């Protein structure tokens, strides 16, 4: 790894204790255990695959039981979000595969809606107003989105951007039935977002070598 990667990892590990020792995290032992595993993998500097992205999805899913969580990387020149990890809500993924023949990981979602972009640039968890329709970001056919909503919904959806030096570098989406994320869970999610942004920057640096 080069100097830039070392700097990103140093920043992440500087945030580690503040997150693991956060009072709010003590009420969520499963999430804390996953966070410890996450930081251990970062310390080992193993960014050769998407496993650290997958751990991010699992950390968020532990706070939103039964929901689908996806982690996305943002390509500014293409104005597209690429799904790099996904977990939860198996039936959702199965319907997408069966009726749309679409593999979720690697799927690119156009970020053309200015309101959606501005919401992500806040770098905080927020409710997505129109639910699944807006969460899909025109990355899936409307008929398929309607079918999933009809068969499994209605869904409540949340999003949050990963921000590094005021630039959007990625995001997460949470899609669940009858889901309401309380203030404690929201606080934890907002706490880890800067780390997720730094992990994205580390992955990018590795890919550019």
Image (spheres, grey):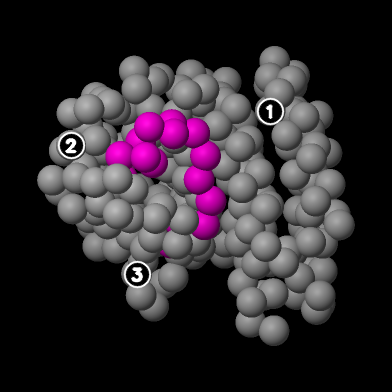
Q: Residues within 10 Å of mark 1 (few under 14, many from 20)?
A: many
Q: Which residue is mark 2?
A: 147
Q: What's the mark number on residue 140?
A: none
- Magenta range is 82-96
Relative placement, left or right, of 74 versus 111 is: right
Residue placed at 39% from the left, 78% from the top?
77
Q: What whole-number distance in Å separates the C-alpha atoms at marks 3 and 1? A: 32 Å
Q: What's the mark number on residue 79?
A: 3
Q: What whole-number distance in Å separates the C-alpha atoms at marks 3 and 2? A: 27 Å
Snapshot quadrant of residue 177: top left
Snapshot quadrant of residue 185: top right
Vertical order, 168 against 53 (above or below): below
Q: Which residue is outermost to the left? A: 143
Whole-percent x, y for residue 17 in the image:
83, 39
Residue placed at 74% from the left, 28% from the top?
32
Whole-percent x, y for residue 107 in the image:
39, 60
| SS label for mark 2 | helix
Whole-percent x, y for residue 44 in the image:
86, 57
Residue placed at 79% from the left, 54% from the top?
42
Q: Which residue is outermost to the front? A: 98
Q: Which residue is mark 1?
A: 31
Whole-percent x, y for residue 9 in the image:
78, 60
Queried whether the magenta region covers residue 89, the answer comes back as yes
Q: What whole-number distance in Å separates the C-alpha atoms at marks 2 and 1? A: 32 Å
Residue placed at 63% from the left, 82% from the top?
208
């Amino acid at each position: 790894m080069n100097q830039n990667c070392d700097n990103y990892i140093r920043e992440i590990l500087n945030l580690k204790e503040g997150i693991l020792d956060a009072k709010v995290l003590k009420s969520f032992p499963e999430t804390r255990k996953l966070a410890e595993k996450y930081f251990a993998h970062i310390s080992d500097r193993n960014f050769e695959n998407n496993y650290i992205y997958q751990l991010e999805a699992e950390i968020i899913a532990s706070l939103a039981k039964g929901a689908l969580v996806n982690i996305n990387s943002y390509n500014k020149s293409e104005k597209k979000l690429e799904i790099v990890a996904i977990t939860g809500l198996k039936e959702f993924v199965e319907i997408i595969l069966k009726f749309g023949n679409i593999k979720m990981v690697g799927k690119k979602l156009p970020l053309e809606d200015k309101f959606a972009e501005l919401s992500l640039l806040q770098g905080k968890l927020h409710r997505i107003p129109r639910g699944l329709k807006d969460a899909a970001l025109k990355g899936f056919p409307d008929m398929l989105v309607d079918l999933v909503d009809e068969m499994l919904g209605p869904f409540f959806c949340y999003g949050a951007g990963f921000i590094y030096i005021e630039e959007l570098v990625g995001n997460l989406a949470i899609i669940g039935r009858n889901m309401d994320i309380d203030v404690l869970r929201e606080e934890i999610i907002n706490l880890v977002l800067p780390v997720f942004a730094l992990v994205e920057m580390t992955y990018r640096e590795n890919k550019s070598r």
